[in-house]
Amino acid sequence: MSDRPPDPVAGPPAERLARRLDEGATRPSITEGLRELGRLDVAAYRAIAGTRSPALDDPLRRLSQIATRSKLWLGIAAVMAVFGGAKGRRAALTGVAALAMDSVVVNLAGKHSFRRRRPDPLEAGVPDARRIEMPLSPSFPSGHAASGFAFAEAVAETMPALAIPLRLLAAGVAYSRVHTGVHYPGDVIAGALIGSSIGGGTGLVARGIDPRGAGRYLAREPRSVTAACTARSSAPGHLPGERERR
């Protein structure tokens, strides 16, 4: 038996899901809606491919290449770790942890579950100036979009000031994958949603186990107990030593 993975399957995931639902007792309006989503996905890809934007082609191509294998996000994490102090190191570690989790979910599980075939940039008319090497992995969901938003959301939980810049950068990377012709728009939308969920969850977990946060809570607790006892002892009708006589 061959160890070669099965060939990617043609067609948008929404359209393939509609075909499966046709076999059951699903309402026709649902399956037709899924087919329309699939057609819109392909139509949007071709519209972007056919829109000339020479001023954007080279910057977006370079951005897409820099983000390959998360080099862009790991570089940003390194800068935060070196120059951001303790908070920056914590944010960098959280972001890298989100990248690792995202890679497992998207590249090992997601892509090989759907096995969507990559688009054909030549057939769609993607200009030569935009094109990059076509990846060999399945198209859905986009790993670049997922990793970008996973990193951005994870870091935002620790350093909220970086939330908007990192999200904008992640959105730029996600769009660059469609612009360069290696992904359909539906691929990057799904990747962004998956990555945002993973990054937000990772950030919340990291914030919940922050030892400094626990230390601050414990430091406040004795004062809270003392304040409560003082308020109770000064309440009207309270007699000193009442608790001891009970």
Image: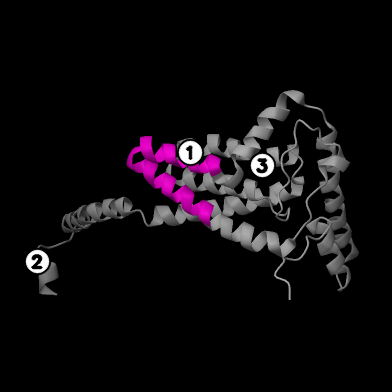
User: Is residue 246 magenta-colored?
Assistant: no
Contact flag, marks 1 and 2 (Cβ < 8 Å): no
Mark 1 residue crowding within 10 angstroms, few (<14) / some (14–19) / many (20+): some
Label 1, on which residue?
76
Q: Nearer the viewer, mark 1 or mark 2?
A: 1
Q: Secondary structure at mark 3?
A: helix
Q: Is residue 78 magenta?
A: yes
Cα separation, mark 1 vs mark 2, equals 61 Å
Please state which amino acid type lies under the numbered disc 1. Ile
Q: Which residues are magenta?
A: 71-100
User: Is residue 1 positioned above or below 80 on the image?
Assistant: below
Of the 4 image quadrants, the one containing the C terminus is bottom left
Of labels 3 and 2, earlier in sequence is 3
Q: Which mark is residue 241?
A: 2
* Secondary element at tag 1: helix
The residue wearing badge 3 is: 174
In the rendered image, residue 30, in percent from the top left (x then y), is placed at 85, 61
Amino acid type of the residue that numbered disc 2 sits on in the rendered structure: Gly
The type of residue carrying mark 3 is: Ala
The answer to whether residue 203 is left or right of residue 190 is left
